[in-house]
Image (spheres, rainbow, N blue to C red):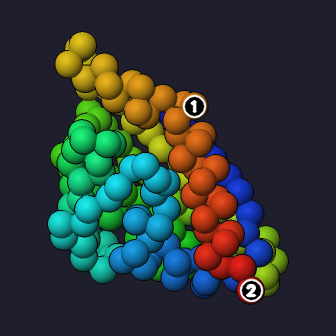
Amino acid sequence: MKIFNNTFQVKAPIQAVADFHSSTTALKRLTPFPVVVRIHHLEPLAEGSIAKFTMWFGPFPVRWVAQHVQVDPSNGFTDVQISGPMLIWEHTHSFRPISDQVTEIRDYIEFVHRPGFKHFWTRLLYAPVMLRFLFFYRAWTTRMALRR
């Protein structure tokens, strides 16, 4: 099992952070160009809710179905891949107030690549350097969206 962990702070109250992450537009906003996300089905964030989407890496589609679990409206939630490119993917988003106007956001991912050469591409797209770039972008986007 591989682990990716990223933590950053944003100048916004915890409720604003939770509202931003529970928005049906969050996934698209948090995905950097040139990756394009197409949402097929997205239920409002709640325990057991489902998200079905395709991430396009250029001409290559990567389909995902994720379920939200351990949903705490103010403190975070976990996305569990039901079907998709990885053997296992569990992404926990947690929010912690540092002060009334500053919130810490933590992304913690446990994942396992599918075995075999056929799935080598996931080792490239979801390599630590690519995940670092993705979450640097997500931190920047979150800060921009929540700035006053």
* Residue drawn at (48%, 29%) of the image: 127
What type is the residue that disc 1 sits on? Val
Q: Closest to the observer: 11 or 37? A: 37
Q: Position of residue 100 (x, y in %)?
A: 79, 84
> What SS does tag 1 mark?
helix
Q: Alpha carbon of mark 1 to alpha carbon of mark 2: how far? A: 31 Å
Quarter holding the C terminus is bottom right
What is the x, y in percent for residue 83?
19, 46
Q: Secondary structure at mark 2?
A: loop
Kindly identify which residue carries mark 2. Answer: 148
The residue that disc 1 covers is 129
Q: Nearer the viewer, residue 140 or 80?
A: 140
Give the residue type that dot 2 points to: Arg
- Where residue 15 appears, as percent x and y from the top left, is 60, 84
Residue at x 57% of width, y 58% of height: 138
Q: At x 24% / y 76%, what residue is drawn?
A: 43
